[in-house]
Amino acid sequence: MTNVERHQYILKQLKEVGIVQVVDLCEELGVSSVTIRKDLTLLEESGLLFRTHGGATQYNPYTTDRTVFEKEKLRSDDKNRIGKKAAEMIEENDSIIIASGTTMQSLARQIMPKGNITVVTSALNVAMELIKYPSVEIMQMGGTLRKTSTSVTGKYAENLLQDFYCSKLFLGVDGIDLDYGVSTSSAQEAQLNRIMIDTAQKVVVLADSSKFGRRSFGRICGFDKIDVLITDDKVSAGFVESLEKAGVSVIVV
């Protein structure tokens, strides 16, 4: 395969998946990691991709704070599959936390309560999705409203969590990086997410594959704090392997 053919293959993969890993490209193209890294460097210098640790992404790996109304239009099919799988984990008499984000909204939309459950949430859109279920007790957290995410942060929200211990936390993130961990665009939201993690017995991250290889401003935690990660089938096999080695159970839908 010529240099041009390799470059075309890499760009095709980026267009379809959004991210590529050096280890995967070496196996798929039958060349060394040195060759692939040179290819990625050349393509980055041409403005065709962004290099990340161990690979490259189609988009700038440092995420910005988009509104929930923009995000809900992106990868909606993937988010719905992820949300449906997460909803299957909810059991009768569960007390759970649902954090903010459009994937969390997809989860809330697909909850089919088998019995009484209690949901603590920081997100107004999540609460509005759940209000139709008589068997779901909703505890809406208070605090400072972030208009971009329609969720609350701050001391009022943080203090409320000190009085609870929940079986599961369902957490949405803006970035997943093998060195940096999981992150979100707001430092205040990252702080609240860390308290949520300490309040839950099991932490389940919901993230479509576009979040991989990206970093946001507010670091939430490393992978040692995460029990399960649910993502879509466009995720790189290299990422899945690395996360499983770190002790995270990865569910691909």
Image (cartoon, helix red, strand yellow):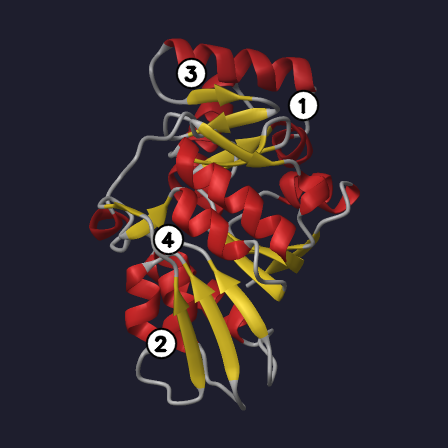
> Marks 4 and 2: which is nearer the front?
2
Quadrant location of residue 194?
top right
Looking at the image, is mark 2 or mark 3 earlier in the sequence? 3
| Residue 196 placement (x, y as % from top left) | 55, 51
> Marks 4 and 1: which is nearer the front?
4
Task: State the residue at coordinates (26%, 50%).
Answer: 68
Q: Is residue 248 left or right of residue 13?
A: right
Task: State the residue at coordinates (30%, 35%).
Answer: 65
* Quadrant the N terminus occupies: top right
**Residue denoted by label 4:** 101
**Residue denoted by label 1:** 31
For residue 226, above or below residue 79: above
| Mark 2 and mark 1: Cα distance apart in space | 51 Å
The numbered dot on residue 130 is 2
Q: Amino acid at mark 1?
A: Val
Mark 2 neighbour class, 10 Å CA radius: few under 14, some 14 to 19, many 20 or more: many
Q: Amino acid at mark 2?
A: Leu
Looking at the image, is mark 4 or mark 2 earlier in the sequence? 4
| Residue 183 placement (x, y as % from top left) | 50, 36
> Marks 2 and 1: which is nearer the front?
2
Q: Marks 2 and 1: CB-CB under 8 Å?
A: no
Q: Secondary structure at mark 2?
A: helix
| Mark 2 and mark 3: Cα distance apart in space | 46 Å
Task: State the residue at coordinates (55%, 63%).
Answer: 253
**Residue denoted by label 3:** 43
| Mark 1 and mark 3: Cα distance apart in space | 17 Å
**From this viewpoint, is residue 187 visible?**
yes
Mark 3 neighbour class, 10 Å CA radius: few under 14, some 14 to 19, many 20 or more: some
